[in-house]
Image (cartoon, rainbow, N blue to C red):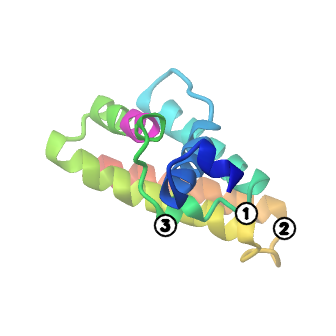
Amino acid sequence: MALYRHVDDKDALLDGLVELLLTEVPVVTGTWDERLTALAHGIRDTARRHPAVFPLVLTRPAVTPAARAVRDSVHAALRDEGLPAPSVARAERLISTAVLGFAASEAAGRFREHKQDVLDADFAELLRWLRLALETA
């Protein structure tokens, strides 16, 4: 109950945890591809550090201003890539689902029978597929 002196309710607490997870990823400058790649690797690192709470990012939307800023940075990178405005939100949802899903699966131990170099290669391939999808969008 002591936590509720700092947050209104359970939803606010969970939203705050999502914010902390998303904002733990450092913001980088560079091309759209460099920014999205750094964000993807940062998300994966965050999932590894916080495997017990990381699934929250799959079940709760980014609603706090700081959490939305992370999502908005993805939108900005996609616009910089030249993606038409009507396609940006959908592309962000699909990219985020793929990256977050891989990171959560890895952190939860779903891939534990594979060596780290295999997982690193799989993640690199996932990012390559996402780049290809963006090029054809």
Residue drawn at 57 percent across, 52 percent down: 13
Residue 51 image position (x, y, % from top left): 74, 62
Residue drawn at 41 percent across, 42 percent down: 71
The residue at which mark 3 appears reads as 59
Please identify the dominant SS of the magenta region.
Answer: helix
Residue drawn at 58 percent across, 58 percent down: 125
Residue 36 image position (x, y, % from top left): 49, 39
- Secondary structure at badge 2 equals loop
Residue 130 located left or right of residue 52 = left
Question: N-terminal of the two: label 3 or label 2?
Answer: 3
Marking on residue 55: none
- Secondary structure at badge 1 equals helix
Question: What separation in Å lies between label 2 and label 1 (alpha carbons)?
Answer: 7 Å
- Classed neighbour count for the residue bearing mark 1: other residues with Cα under 10 Å, few (<14), some (14–19), many (≥20): some
Residue 81 image position (x, y, % from top left): 32, 34
The residue at which mark 2 appears reads as 115
Residue 35 located left or right of residue 111 = left
Question: What amino acid does circle 2 point to?
Answer: Lys
Tell me if label 2 and label 1 are in contact, CB under 8 Å. Answer: yes
Observer-side mark, 3 or 1, equals 3
- Classed neighbour count for the residue bearing mark 2: other residues with Cα under 10 Å, few (<14), some (14–19), many (≥20): few
- Which one is in front, 113 or 43? 43
Question: What amino acid does circle 3 point to?
Answer: Thr
Residue drawn at 57 percent across, 62 percent down: 56
Question: What separation in Å lies between label 3 and label 2 (alpha carbons)?
Answer: 28 Å
Magenta segment range? 69-74
Residue 31 located left or right of residue 101 = left
The residue at which mark 1 appears reads as 119
Residue 19 image position (x, y, % from top left): 54, 43
